[in-house]
Image (cartoon, rainbow, N blue to C red):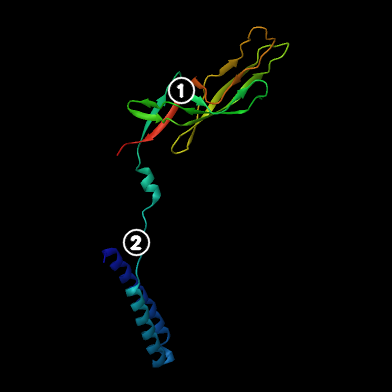
Amino acid sequence: MSIGHISSRLFLVLLTAFVSAGRLHAHTVAGPGAVTQEINRCLMIVRIAATRRTESPQKPFARQAKGKRYDDYQVPAGTPLVVRLRTSLDSASGQVDDAVRATLLSAVSQDGAELIPKGSTLHGKVIDVEPASKQKPIGRLVVEFNVIEHSETHSLATIQTRSVPFAATLEPKEKFRDVRVESGEELTLTLAIPLKVRLPKAQ
């Protein structure tokens, strides 16, 4: 039994004794029967206090979190990101703000630390689209990516890639043609702004 538990029980016993002494004084004029009842009640409270089991307090989670240390890294602007498209694109049917998805094919590492793991998902959108027409015979669309999702933790980070334009190529005798990019095509994106990454320190 710890010293803290003994001190707590001793305090309860003394507190009960003081309260009971006051009640005994109040009941003196009532006769010996009231005194006997008060003594029995006092002994019962003392036994309960002595046998009560005190639960040990849990460790606070906040203190554990504060003890965790991190290393801060920065993926510089201009870093290439090799990805595979998971969304098909077509200037004939595409609209501005259409969602675009891609998968990172190569991990991004720095000083031996993996900052962005292979398989992470990049979320982007179409920011410009022009269907082919007689006035504009070559279809065109532009995409960019602004969010990356960690492949393991699924946490999200804001990124900004340079816009990637796609334009059709007219074949002989064609008057106009739309551009279509199939899902599964590999692209090399480029970070337009630095990306900050915080990793837990190795134990």
Across and down, in percent, residue 172 comes to: 64, 7
Is there CB contact under 8 Å for labels 1 and 2? no
Across and down, in percent, residue 4 comes to: 29, 63
Q: Residues within 10 Å of mark 2 (few under 14, many from 20)?
A: few
Ranked by sequence position, the earlier of labels 1 and 2 is 2
Q: Which amino acid is tagged 1? A: Leu
Camera-nearest residue between 102 and 61: 102
Query: Label 1's element?
Result: strand
- Examine the image and state in which quarter residue 144 appears: top right
Residue under pointer 1: 81
Camera-nearest residue between 84 and 9: 84
Query: What residue sits 42% from the left and 84% below the top?
Result: 26
- Examine the image and state in which quarter residue 125 appears: top right
Query: What residue sits 61% from the left and 11% below the top?
Result: 169
Residue 56 circle label: 2
Q: Is residue 136 above or below residue 71?
A: above
Which label sits in the foreground, 1 or 2?
1
Q: Which amino acid is tagged 2? A: Ser
Camera-nearest residue between 5 and 95: 95
Camera-nearest residue between 29 and 47: 47
Across and down, in percent, residue 161 comes to: 51, 22
Image-based side of 123 in relation to 136, left or right: left
Query: What residue sits 69% from the left and 15% below the top?
Result: 132
- Examine the image and state in which quarter residue 55 appears: bottom left
Image-based side of 85 in relation to 111, left or right: right
Across and down, in percent, residue 154 comes to: 47, 38
